[in-house]
Image: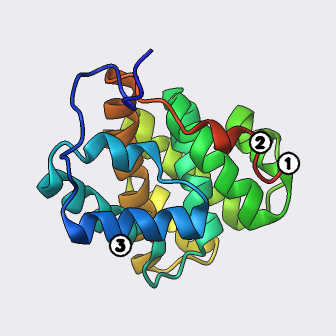
C-alpha cells in the first residue's frame, strides 16, 4: 500500500519549497492534518498554488454566504457526484460548522431529508441544477434565489462553489483520491 493520496504515481516535490512547507504546517496546526487533496497537488507546486488560491478564495474569503453555506453547497454537489473524498472531508466540515453531526450525515446522504429553511433549500436546489443540468438554468432559477434572500453576488458565489466542486469531484474520482482517515471520526 502506498502512502500517496491518489492511485497515480505522482510523489510530492521533495523537499517542499519553504512557502509550501509553511502552508502545510499551518494546515497541520489548524486542522490537525494536511488534507490529502493538498498532498495530491504537491507534485507540481504551481498547480498546488493555483488550486489552493481558488479554494481559499471561494471557501474562505468574504462572501454573503456563510462558511457553512459554502460547505453545504460542496456536500450537496459531491453527493450528486458520489465523490468519496469530498463527501468525507466536507461532510466533516458541515458537522463542525453546524455543530450538528446529524446535519452533516443528512447532507451527505440526501440534503432534501434535512430540515432546511427556504433559503438553504433554494441554494441547494440551484447548486444541484448547476451539477446535473446547468444548461437549463434560467432567469426563474436565479429569481428563486433572489426571492430566498440571495443577492446577485451571492448567486455568483453559489454558482462558483458548485462549479468548483464539480471539477474537484471529477479529479478526485478519476484519480482515486482518498480522504485523510482522521475525517471519519471528527465532530461526531
The quarter in which the N terminus is drawn is top left
Residue at the farthest top position = 1
Q: Locate residue 84, reporting x and y percent.
A: 55, 29
Q: Is residue 185 left or right of residue 148?
A: right
Q: Is residue 61 left or right of residue 145?
A: left
- Mark 2 → mark 3, Cα distance in angstroms: 27 Å
Mark 2 touches mark 3? (CB < 8 Å)? no
**Circle 1 sits on which residue?**
188
> Counting residues from the N terminus, which is met first, the one under dot 3 or under dot 1?
3
Secondary structure of residue under mark 3: helix
Q: Locate residue 186, reporting x and y percent.
A: 75, 49
Residue 137 in sight from this viewpoint: no
Q: Locate residue 159, reporting x and y percent.
A: 39, 59
Pointer 3 local density, CA inside 10 Å: few below 14, some 14–19, many at least 20: few
> Counting residues from the N terminus, which is met first, the one under dot 2 or under dot 3?
3
Q: Nearer the viewer, residue 43 or 163?
A: 43
**Circle 2 sits on which residue?**
185
Q: Residue at x 31, y 33 (%)?
A: 171
**Circle 3 sits on which residue?**
57
Q: Residue at x 39, y 44 (%)?
A: 37
User: Residue 30, which numbered label?
Assistant: none
- Give the answer, above or below, for where 129 lies relative to 119: above
- Mark 3 → mark 1, Cα distance in angstroms: 28 Å
Indicate the quadrant where residue 43 lies: top left
Q: Residue at x 31, y 64 (%)?
A: 21
- Mark toward the viewer: 2 or 3: 2
Q: Locate residue 18, reporting x and y percent.
A: 22, 69
- Mark 1 → mark 2, Cα distance in angstroms: 6 Å
Q: Nearer the viewer, residue 77 or 51?
A: 51
Amino acid at each position: 500500500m502506498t502512502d500517496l493520496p491518489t492511485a497515480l504515481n505522482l510523489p510530492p516535490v521533495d523537499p517542499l519549497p519553504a512557502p509550501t512547507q509553511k502552508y502545510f504546517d499551518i494546515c497541520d496546526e489548524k486542522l490537525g492534518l494536511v488534507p490529502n487533496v493538498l498532498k495530491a497537488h504537491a507534485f507540481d507546486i504551481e498547480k498546488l498554488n493555483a488550486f489552493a488560491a481558488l479554494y481559499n478564495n471561494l471557501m474562505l474569503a468574504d462572501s454573503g454566504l456563510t462558511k457553512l453555506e459554502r460547505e453545504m453547497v460542496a456536500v450537496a454537489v459531491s453527493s450528486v457526484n458520489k465523490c468519496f473524498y469530498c463527501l468525507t472531508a466536507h461532510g466533516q466540515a458541515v458537522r463542525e460548522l453546524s455543530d450538528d453531526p446529524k446535519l452533516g450525515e443528512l447532507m451527505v446522504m440526501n440534503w432534501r431529508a434535512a430540515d432546511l429553511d427556504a433559503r438553504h433549500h433554494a441554494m441547494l436546489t440551484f447548486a444541484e441544477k448547476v451539477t446535473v443540468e446547468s444548461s437549463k438554468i434560467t432567469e426563474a432559477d436565479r429569481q428563486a434565489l433572489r426571492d430566498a434572500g440571495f443577492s446577485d453576488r451571492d448567486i455568483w458565489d453559489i454558482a462558483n462553489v458548485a462549479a468548483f466542486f464539480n471539477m474537484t469531484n471529477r479529479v478526485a474520482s478519476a484519480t482515486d483520491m482518498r480522504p485523510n482517515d482522521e475525517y471519519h471520526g471528527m465532530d461526531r
